[in-house]
Image (spheres, rainbow, N blue to C red):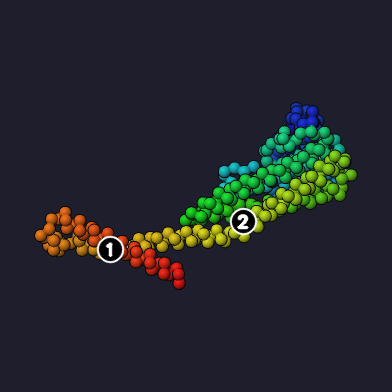
Amino acid sequence: MQLNYNINDGKVKQTDDKNSQIIVFENPNEYEKNILVNTYSIDEHNIQSALDPNEVSRLEFEDEYAAVIYKKPKNYSSQDEFTFKAFTVGVFYFKERIIIIIGESIILFEDKFFSKVETLSDVLLKLLNEAINHFMMHLRVINLITEELETKITKAMENKHLLNLFSISKSLVYYLNAIEANTTIISKMKRYSQKMDFGEKQLDFLEDIAIENYQCFRQAEIYTTVLGGLMDARGTIVNNNMNVLIKRLTIINIIFLPINVIASIGGMSEFSMMTEGLSWRVSYALFMAVMAVIGFLTYQFVKRLESKTGES
């Protein structure tokens, strides 16, 4: 699908003008790909690169345009099951036009990121800046989800929450690679700023983008290291919780073992014969009291044995 935008009053606004300054192709079909190749002379390989989610970020210069392939986080949904993904955006920077190719249907130009836009180079830099901010927001969400899962793991008896943490840990590795790949683009833009027609204002903004991207990379790196380093410890917690549960069940079985024996005897006809001179209410009340005392004494014996084992 083709979408057209122009820069008006410092903002990027959608238009019906086919000859607009900014043209976005969302998941282009064969007809639109032919337009990209025949009308705008964009190489088929670059088109496929922009639609490939596993493509490496890069900056290349062709005769008529600069091809910027960078990574951006995919919007998270509950169906992703704690897996955060990134996809590829292809920006083809001409002197009088920007063509963007994406394989996802997303909102590219949010007002909070695309204000005070004057030139096409501003649009290009703000696209990179928006991607970095999107990564930062996802990292905050990942941190919150991780803390919640850690709380659940301390009480968990199954591996469900632990597997969710594994998915997040895997996502962080992909994010780390994507952010690092975007660093290469920013560095190359600095070196070839004249080819990109960057003025002093754009260079200052590019420097700010480089700093934010570095901070984003460091934050992702810290989260990856911490989450990966403590994964074994969290698995041990789940196993320990299961061992504690089994121990409690074992204690209950030990307590009721002698009681079951006595209850079996009490259910036999010989017990009624032995207590023939007593009312059945009195005899069975005494019988229940004896079982309670034996159960309590057994519990105290097991607890004392457990404490001695712990001290040793």
Q: Residue at x 20, y 56 (%)?
A: 285
Q: Nearer the viewer, residue 180 or 64?
A: 180
Say which element carries label 2: helix
| Residue identified by numbered label 2 | 227
Quarter-of-image position of residue 265: bottom left
| Residue identified by numbered label 1 | 294
Q: Residue at x 87, y 41 (%)?
A: 200
Q: Is residue 240 left or right of residue 121?
A: left
Q: Residues within 10 Å of mark 2 (few under 14, many from 20)?
A: some
Q: What separation in Å lies between label 1 and label 2 (alpha carbons)?
A: 49 Å
Q: Residue at x 72, y 47 (%)?
A: 71
Q: Is residue 230 left or right of residue 53?
A: left
| Place of residue 95 in the rendered image (x, y in percent of width and height, measured from the top left) | 86, 38
Q: Residue furthest left?
A: 277
| Place of residue 48 in the rendered image (x, y in percent of width and height, measured from the top left) | 74, 46
Q: Residues within 10 Å of mark 1 (few under 14, many from 20)?
A: some
| Place of residue 224 in the rendered image (x, y in percent of width and height, measured from the top left) | 65, 55
Q: Which amino acid, mark 1?
A: Ile
Viewer-nearest of discs 1 and 2: 1
Figure quadrant of the N terminus: top right
Q: Tell me: residue 162, above or below residue 212.
A: below
Say which element carries label 1: helix
Q: Nearer the viewer, residue 35 or 251?
A: 251
Figure quadrant of the C terminus: bottom left
One can see residue 43 in this view: no
Q: Nearer the viewer, residue 45 or 12?
A: 12
| Place of residue 161 in the rendered image (x, y in percent of width and height, measured from the top left) | 53, 52
Q: Tell me: residue 275, above or below residue 3.
A: below
Q: Which amino acid, mark 2?
A: Leu
